[in-house]
Amino acid sequence: MEDFSKYDFAPVMNYPEELFVLDLSERYDPDLIRSKPWAIGKYNEKRSRMYTAVQYEGKRNIHMGIDIWTNEGAPVFSFYDGVLAYKANHAQQGNYGPTLVVRYEIGDVTLYALYGHLSLESLSGKDIGRSIEKGQKIAELGAEKVNGGWAPHLHFQLSVQDPGGADMPGVVADDFHEQALKQYPDPRMVLGDIY
């Protein structure tokens, strides 16, 4: 993969330099998350007792994105110039809720970035194929009632393969883990040292 350190990427949210880094390997505590103005959920973290919705089949629990928790309505920005590839509302409990996927051409690499758990308004007026500029506000975080039942946060995930829609498996099972690490690289390659 290309060395992205030579690129100047915009932050995907207006988060402070110091973020509370969560350890979700033991448990998901929405009250703890809500008590922090900003919190981070890590990439490639095996999480315990968090994914109980039916679609996780009781075995998908390794997180393939980075979560950025803060208040509902917080703005979300594009990290680079791209094109809106897909949009959808995954309204099922425990899912992403409103979701955008943007395609980025960075040097010789094509990356797809999923922005999940957005507000319903974030999908309005967004035409597939529309150009998006680096640093442009593209969405806002959704409320718990529209984002799959989660405390408000952004799920940000990268893919080196076209996902074919506004979806990527945010968590994977052990038997797909090795392949997922290749297909869904660490988002810090564009976010920087966020934790």
Image: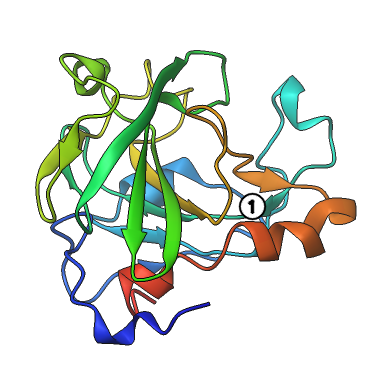
Please give the name of the residue rendered at 72% of the width and 52% of the height, measured from the top-left corner.
48
The correct choice, above or below, for 121 with respect to 9 in the image is above
Please give the name of the residue rendered at 58% of the width and 49% of the height, measured from the top-left corner.
161
Please give the name of the residue rendered at 21% of the width and 40% of the height, measured from the top-left corner.
71
The correct choice, above or below, for 159 with respect to 44 in the image is above
Find residue 107 and report its horizontal and vertical position in percent. Answer: 34, 71
Find residue 70 and report its horizontal and vertical position in percent. Answer: 26, 47
Front in this rendered view, residue 11 or 19: 11
The correct choice, above or below, for 130 with respect to 68 in the image is above
- Is any part of residue 64 visible from this angle? yes
Report whether 108 appears left or right of 162: left
The residue wearing badge 1 is: 27
The correct choice, above or below, for 191 with respect to 113 in the image is below
Quadrant where the C terminus lies? Answer: bottom left
Front in this rendered view, residue 194 or 135: 135
Q: Residue furthest front?
A: 108
The quarter of the picture where residue 89 lies is top left
Report whether 99 appears left or right of 131: right
